[in-house]
Image: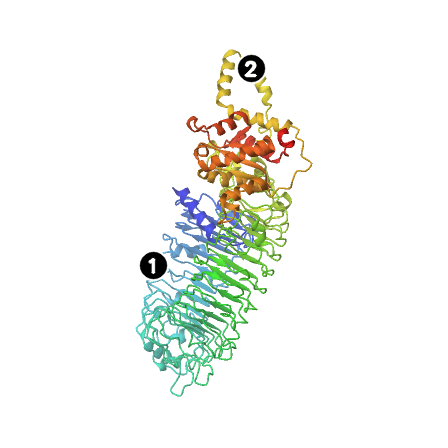
Amino acid sequence: MGSILFFLWMITSYVIRAPVYSTTTFCGENMCLCDASKHSATCRSERTITYLSYFPKLPNYITDVTFKDFIRPNISREDVANLTYLSLKYLQLKSMDIERMERGLFQSFSKLKILKISNNSKLTSEVVKEAFQNISTTLRELALTSNNFTTLEIDVFKYLNHTNLKKVDLSGNLLLNMKAEIFQSLNLTTLDLSMSNLSSLTKICPRQSPFLHTLRNLVLKSTNISGIPRYIFSCFPNLQILILEDNNLTSFLSFCNIFHRNRTAPNDLITLSLGNTSLSGNISTNVFRCFPKLTSFKLDRNGLTDIPNFCNTKYNARVPRIKQLNLQFTSFSDIWKHSLKCLTSLVDLDLSNNILRNPPSFCSQNYSSYTPKLSKLFFRNTSILTLRRHKFRCLLNLKALDLSSNYFKDIPSFCNESNESTNPSLEKLDLSNNKIQTIFPGSFRCLTSLKTLYLSHTSVKKLDNNIFSPLISLNQLKIVNSDSLVEIGKYAFNISSLRSLTFADNNFNFEDVMRYSPKNLFKYCSHVKTLVLTGNHFPTGPVAQEILRSLKSLTTLYLTKTRMYTIHRDTFNSLISLRKLFLDQNRLTTWNEDVFKNVSKLTYLNLALNKISVFHKTLVPISVLNNLKIFNLAYNPFDCGCDMIWFKKWSLTTNVTLLSFPKMYSCKTPANMLHKPLLSLKLTEEDCKEKNIWLIVIISSCGGAFLLLCIAITTSLQMPTIKNYMYYFRLKKMGYVKLINEQEFTYDAHVVYCESNEKWVIQTLVAKLETKGFRLCIADRDFEVGADKCDQIVSAFKESKKILVVLSNDFAKNEWCLWQMNLVEERLRQSGNSAVVFVLYKNINSKNMISSVHRILKKRSIVTWYEGGARENLFWKVVDMALEAPLSEPPISVIHG
């Protein structure tokens, strides 16, 4: 059960991180995941409960180490000897049931800067104190979070006085008996006491306390504090950041009066966070007199009914320096007309998640701005229906506007009466999660500076031609989760400035060329470097190359979850600059060996979570494979037989980083290797050498009458296989005379099959043959919609060099198939036996054996389908040779006819 949980955790971690260019691999005797790019190692238990018998040796480049979810009650200096050879700067010991640590445990880590010991409920502050003895002077950050410390020894930090310690995090502990003397002689700048039972700041801020005079950042989230002592700035004279989120303050008014009790007291507070502190109603104007240097003010998740008035009676600013104001999740509905009048320094305003009847006014009567410096404005999920009367026309410096999750049915206008931009500096616009149904060619005409546009989760059905053309500066476009989108205009993406296009999870079928123009889709996106097509239906035929042909500058391509079962040989031919390719979470089994021949600059290839059973050495040219920096082939159902010997050898000798190797490279077949790691494959090349089948037959024939009887019985049972061999050798030895006037055909073969056998025909037969370069005509795929089917079948017979007939019991019962058999027999009479290739997919019952089918089975060479092993390999060889063989001379009667 533990192994299953770990596997699910790894799968989840992979899916979340899949798009990230990572260098993660197993290390530390497979107990850890190491990331070379971050110089980090994370060592985590594979099961819910695992005892850590020793600390493993890690690669020399590691500087950051985390151990978590192990059991290790006692840790000595000898235990961590394998870590002392590293230039360790960061060490975390989390959820390890630690009870004892040897005195001076960390003294050998001479470069240690950050130490975190967390989630060890049996640990005491006395043990921690002794472990700090002789610790390096380089230590600057210490976290002792969620260790269930009820009290802390007064001298718990006595061995840290000589260090450069600046930050202490004690969050998640009870701390019922906190005393300011604990921090004596420490020059802390940051102290975090969040999620504790601290009920009063007087415990760390006694009157005129000298102990924390250097403190700048005080974090008190989710405590029991209800008030602030009036002499707080005597305790913390240099305090700049005060975080009081998720507390139950008595009132904002008393809080501020305490601050202001001594009008001459110095106050350097820059950031004040009062989110979710039970404040309600309106806030008095006078309360802001105590914040002369405040630049960031957070009042989110409170029951406020209006934006606080930041003006005094003379309309002068109470907080002249405020730049950031967070007011999301309040009780606003109507906003006072002049609420923002005195926020002249405001840069960032967040009013998200309020039910606003009308957005606030940013303009005076003469259209001068109350907030001339406003650069970021967030109206996410505010129930706004339209902005026709609210054009933010005086926000000339606005650069980012979030209008997502509202009820817009149209793109808001950003033009004034003179058709000039009301927001000429706007660079980022988010219109996601709205009811937008139509985008008109002029919808974005006044946004010439826009660089980023999000249009996800809309109800748009069609992207018309040139709708994005006015966005002459657009670099990034995201259209995600728009399931209603059914059509894309020929020139919809006419955006020459575009560098990144995300068209993901729209369930758009790129196989259906009636819904868009493959040749013109990205014709004017030649500068795009990143293209994300995840979550759509990407084609596996020649149209794939047409879609990507114009993307000469493309460096990163995401084709994740695009339902691909193979890759057309020419798909990536034009992508000469491609460096990162994501093909994970598809249905890929195999593809033509020429697919990757032109992507010589590829450094990252992700093929994880597909259906690849055998990764042949020809699937990716060895020059391209060895040029990779990162390769991911994890979570594929490998057939651990002879064909995977080379990959096992390559994986053990290559310099390419194989993600999740070796644990997530396991076998599915054969049965004796099920769920075993690929590295457990014991076969050698000598074991896999082809045996002389004729020698075996000769030796076997000498076994006597009993053995001959066995052979006779076996022969009768394996007659289709024998016929396959006979057909194979006949094709191999037969010398056809190619006609001098043999015409050029559109298709190598037209496939005739019964609809009930379509899944095997399309996913197995056609997929395999088309990856080998054969041009096949498939009725449901290649015929013109609406045209007469009979006429198209006759035309397909004429345009195809050969006819490939898939016989089965259902075929023999189907009148439509039998009608086509008449055409097949006529083709045999006209062009000879080599013009038709018969494949027996499933045996035909005697009751369905009509005369035409019986003649075929009796007189013609037929190749019989087998799945798996040498017999399947023989089947594909015979079909390939039969299709490749030139047409023979037609019958004499035809020549002289």
Residue name at image x 53 percent, y 40 percent: 766
Q: Amino acid at mark 2?
A: Ser
Residue at mark 2 to residue at mark 1: CA–CA distance: 87 Å
Q: Nearer the viewer, mark 2 or mark 1?
A: 2
Q: Report the side of 747 relative to 840 (left or right).
A: right
| x, y percent for residue 701 | 56, 15
Q: Badge 2, how many Cα within 10 Å: few under 14, some, many 20+?
A: few
Q: Which disc number belongs to residue 701?
A: 2
Q: Quadrant of the C terminus?
A: top right
Image location of residue 789, percent across then percent down: 49, 44
Q: Hey, which residue is sitting farthest right in the picture? A: 740
Seen from the viewer's position, the closer of residues 22 and 715 is 715
Please name the residue that numbered disc 1 is placed on. Answer: 150
Front in this rendered view, residue 284 or 45: 284
As displayed, is residue 725 above or below residue 213? above
Q: Is residue 608 visible?
A: no
User: Identity of the amino acid at label 1?
Assistant: Thr
State the image coordinates of residue 882 (x, y, percent, origin top left): 59, 33
Toward the top, the furthest residue is 705
Graded by Cα atoms within 10 Å as few (under 14), some (14 to 19) or many (20 or more), the crowding at tag 1 reads some
In the depicted structure, whether residue 471 falls above or below residue 671? below
Q: How many marks?
A: 2
Q: Which numbered circle lies on residue 876?
A: none
In the image shown, does 174 or 784 lie closer to the viewer? 784
**Image quadrant where one finds the N terminus:** top left
- Residue 256, percent from left and from top: 36, 78
